[in-house]
Amino acid sequence: MNTRESSFSWKGFAVLVFILLIVSVVAFIISSIEGFITGVIAVFIGFLLSFFRDDIKRLVGISNDSSSEVDESRPLEPSEIKHLAQLEKYVAKGRVKLEKSISKFESKEKPKKRRKLAREIVEGATSLISLIDQIKSRAILLHRPKVAEHYSHIAEEIESIRKKYSQI
């Protein structure tokens, strides 16, 4: 009377429970990943909204803030002029020093001295680029785009000199 098809088996029950556990774990992992991805997307959208908040307000027409407009007519304060002039003076001196080093480099014939001068040129160019970056930052803060553009061109020239002599 005890046939295999109709009888209760603990082994079959254990397999059924094991399969249900695996399905439950897989479903939990999938829902966790889905929740994580949803959270990441929500945080990313929040970041974008906060980052572009002023642009969105201006686009929609909510904000009538005039602080975002560039005030080209604002006169510079004496301390700002002095600091900018001092930085420009350092850059001018650095460029002269760099030119002298380059002319010395061209006149030297010994490879050891040429390498030493090339290293000095690279170091001088690097310090000049950092000074120029300070001037550009200051010019941007003072709403002087022409000054920043002028020094961007100078920085490009010095960067090409630095690359040329760093290969030697």
Image (tube, rainbow, N blue to C red):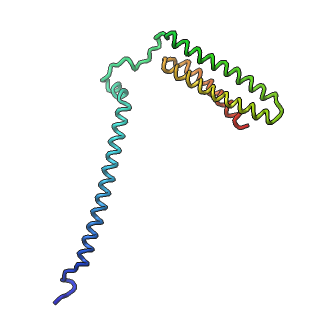
Q: Position of residue 113 (x, y in %)?
A: 79, 33
Quadrant where the C terminus is found in the figure: top right
Query: Foreground: 73 or 104?
Result: 104
Quadrant where the N terminus is found in the figure: bottom left
Horizontally, residue 65 falls left or right of residue 83, namely: left
Horizontally, residue 141 falls left or right of residue 100, namely: left
Q: Position of residue 104 (x, y in %)?
A: 78, 26
- 4 to 106, vertically: above or below: below
Residue drawn 71% across and 33% down? 119
Residue drawn 22% across and 85% down? 4
Residue drawn 63% across and 23% down? 154
Q: Position of residue 35 (x, y in %)?
A: 30, 50
Q: Residue furthest right?
A: 109
- 123 to 145, vertically: above or below: below
Q: Position of residue 95 (x, y in %)?
A: 68, 22
Q: Where, by quadrant of the figure, is residue 118 drawn?
A: top right
